[in-house]
Amino acid sequence: MIVYKTEEEIEFMRASAKVLAQAHGEVAGMIREGITTRELDQRAEEFIRDHGGSPSFKGYNGFEYSLCISPNSVVVHGFPSDYTLKSGDIVSVDCGVLLNGYHADSAYTYPIGEVAPEVLQLLEETKKSLYLGIEQAVAGNRMGDVSFAIQNHVEKQGYGVVRELVGHGIGKKLHERPEVPNYGKRGSGLKLQTGLTLAIEPMVNLGTKSVIQEKDGWTIRTKDLKPSAHFEHTVVVRKDKAEILTSFEYIEKALQ
């Protein structure tokens, strides 16, 4: 069942999204060569709990961490660990916050130190595809319009769009209906209505679109081991323009 949110419910989600955006900013301020991904996870959990929320991912289907931290060829669902970030890496940080009974979800991919130009371009184009998808998340459009906008942009750059993983509805549950594929046909799929809240999250590979799941049952990696980028916002479908509840403002301020 698809749940359309009332303005009161969206206000709760806006509050969880604000804590989430600030938590991302806190983590962004720590990201540098020499830090372990486990340290980032620990700080994110402290920050979220200090601000009255709880990490959406921790305990979800047995996941043990507050962040999914996915370096280089890891697409999503990477475990925080003793891995130390080094120059030339990229790392995707995916975080969710539950506050007042409602979730928000967002992700950002960071370059560490000196990163190859073609990889920096992957990050830039993946983030651009997120906003192109969001532009289509307006009442009266179809889900396929969102999906096509993402796919069309990134495939023009020669990148691979992951098929096995998709965005999703979000609200009282972290994952609600409908699914939000990052590939599709214009004019197809669900007709979007005001009050639908979505986590739109293109996952884009520098090389092949094919991915594999590691033996831990979580970690998704590119089959050709080339880098992958992931950007995500939680949005509300509105009449004329989608409202973005989450924000990269704190991240980008920390990176200046």
Image (tube, rainbow, N blue to C red):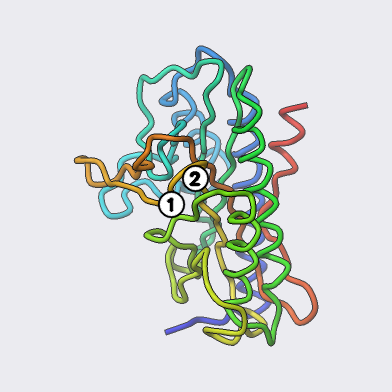
The answer to whether marks 2 and 1 mark residues whose Cβ atoms lie closer than 8 Å is: yes
Determine the CA span between mark 2 and mark 1. Answer: 6 Å
Query: Where is 236 relative to 81, above or below?
Result: below
Q: Amino acid at mark 1?
A: Lys
- Tell me the SS state at disc 2: strand
Q: Residue at x 69, y 87 (%)?
A: 140
Residue 152 in the figure: left or right of residue 56: right
Left or right of 144 on screen, residue 135: right
The percent coordinates of residue 58 (x first, y second) are 37, 46
Find residue 186 and report its horizontal and vertical position in percent. Answer: 61, 79
Q: Residue at x 50, y 45 (%)?
A: 95
Kindly identify which residue carries mark 2.
Answer: 205
- Asked whether the viewer can see residue 128, the reply is yes
What residue is shown with label 1?
Answer: 209
Q: Residue at x 58, y 23 (%)?
A: 31
In the displayed image of the protein, which residue is found farthest to the top?
34
